[in-house]
Amino acid sequence: MTRKLIVGIWVILCLAVLGSVASSAFQGRWKDDGNGGCVFDPNDDGIDQCSPATPNTPTGRFKDDGNGGCVFDPNDSGPNQCTPQVKGRFKKDGDACVWDASGSGDDQCRPSAGRFKKGRDGCAWDEKDSGPDQCNPRESK
């Protein structure tokens, strides 16, 4: 009877150790990288913040156009190659052309008045000014 009890306890301990090793192999989680991407952090645990895109599901990214510009390609995936000076784009809203600070991609329109101007904080839109743009908001930072 004592022998069966010792064997039973030994089997339970072995299963507990085996379960502990198996669960530690799954440590890590998917985290939001703050740039619209999803990265795996093997040194963290908890609930995933995002799901990685499958290779056949492009998420879009900012790419270097080879001429100093930083453009958004909605049909590509992977890490951003650059960061534009100004995030956002002009977007059609009915008959109006408005700035969408969280938008990405090419401008859908351009307001009839205003221009991009150089300032202390970089390249910014000034709707009350006119003339040619002083800077390109799509250039890399």
Image (spheres, helix red, strand yellow):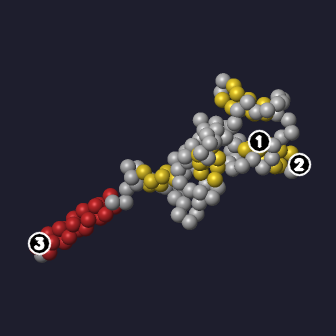
**Which sits in the foreground, 40 or 85?**
85
Q: How far apart are marks 1 and 2 (CA)?
A: 13 Å
The answer to whether 97 is drawn above or below residue 119 in the figure is below
Q: To which residue does mark 2 refer?
A: 95
Q: How far apart are marks 2 and 3 (CA)?
A: 87 Å
Residue 99's tag is: 1
Tell me the kind of residue under disc 2. Answer: Asp
Q: Which of marks 1 and 3 is nearer the N terminus?
A: 3
Tell me the residue at 68%/48% (across/down). Answer: 104
Q: To which residue does mark 3 refer?
A: 2
The answer to whether 60 is drawn above or below residue 141 in the figure is below
Instruction: Name the element at disc 1.
Output: strand
Q: Which of marks 2 and 3 is nearer the N terminus?
A: 3
Instruction: Name the element at disc 2.
Output: loop
Residue occupying the far top of the picture = 120
Q: Report the quarter where the C terminus lies.
A: top right
Is any part of residue 35 visible from this angle?
Answer: no
Tell me the kind of residue under disc 3. Answer: Thr
